[in-house]
Image (cartoon, rainbow, N blue to C red):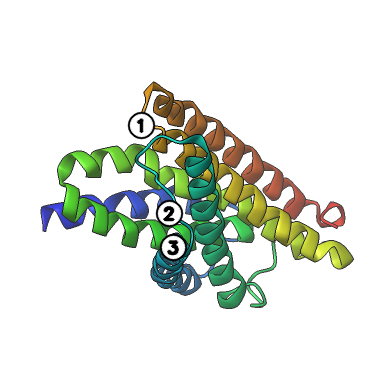
Amino acid sequence: MFLLAVAIAPGIFWLWYFLRRDVLRPEPRHLVVRMFFLGGVAGLAAAILERLAFGAVVLDLDGGRSRDILVGAALIGLIEEGMKFAAVYAGVYRHVEFNEVVDGIIYAVAASMGFATLENIAYVLEGGLGVGVMRAVLSVPGHAFFAAVMGYNIGRAKFAGRREWEWLVGGVLLAALAHALYDAVILTRTALALAVVPIVGILWRRSLAQIRHALFLDENPSRRG
């Protein structure tokens, strides 16, 4: 039970952290909870797709080969961020309550924290407390910040008219790129893996800047298009 609490707590904390920043018109909690659980479903779908993808493409991620690491990281980034996007798009994108730019960030983070919590439970129950602590300070917030990058674009897409899909696709690709970079440096299993710390820090600052800009656009609706 202790390890289960260690696995669940980081996702709840980071969801609360982002919800606290939705200061204009907070989203209905039932929709946030819906997205959290849909994110968990997306996590299961991503696990299946990754198993199929890595079964079809022969990669040696333990051998330190740059090509295999880059291809593997790219596959993980695209599959996992693609599944999170699918959860947001299917679960709430067309909902009447999704009516602000910042909503994209909130719902994307909620889905991502459901995704990360399910993933965290599997890793922590297998790896123990040390794994739980490491993932609490890097992996789980990383998932939140990838989602914030994508969620900002999803929020902008709502008001982009003909450019809607440019924003949506761009959001998925940016999140997948950030995710792939994070995974690639970890998969080197060298001193380069320490680069995840500044990467997460930069993404954190970027997420906060995007929240501020989203709130600015929502206070000035004429500038959202």
- Gap between marks 1 and 3 measured at Cα: 21 Å
Which of the two discs, 3 and 2, sits closer to the camera? 3
Quarter of the figure with residue 159: bottom right
In the foreground, 155 or 216:
155
Sequence order check: which comes first, mark 3 or mark 2?
2
Q: Position of residue 222 (x, y in %)?
A: 87, 56
Q: Which residue is mark 3?
A: 50
Answer yes or no: do the residues labelled 3 and 2 have beta carbons within 8 Å? no
The earlier-in-sequence mark between 1 and 3 is 3
Residue 198 place in picture, x, y as percent: 49, 26
Label 3: few (<14), some (14–19) or many (≥20) C-alpha neighbours in 10 Å: some
Measure the C-alpha gap from mark 2 to mark 1.
29 Å
* SS type, badge 2: helix
Q: From the image, tell me which residue sits under label 2.
A: 15
Q: Is residue 64 visible?
A: yes
Residue under the image location 37 percent in, 38 percent down: 63
Q: Secondary structure at mark 1?
A: loop
Q: Amino acid at mark 3?
A: Glu
Residue depicted at x 51% and y 31%: 199
Give neighbour class at mark 2: few <14, some 14-19, many 20+ (Cα, 10 Å). Answer: many
Q: Pick out the residue farthest to the left.
A: 1
Quadrant of the rendering where the N terminus is positioned: bottom left
Q: Which mark is residue 189?
A: 1
Can you tell which of label 2 and label 1 is closer to the viewer? 1
Q: Earlier in the sequence, mark 2 or mark 1?
A: 2
| Mark-to-mark CA distance, 3 and 2 | 25 Å
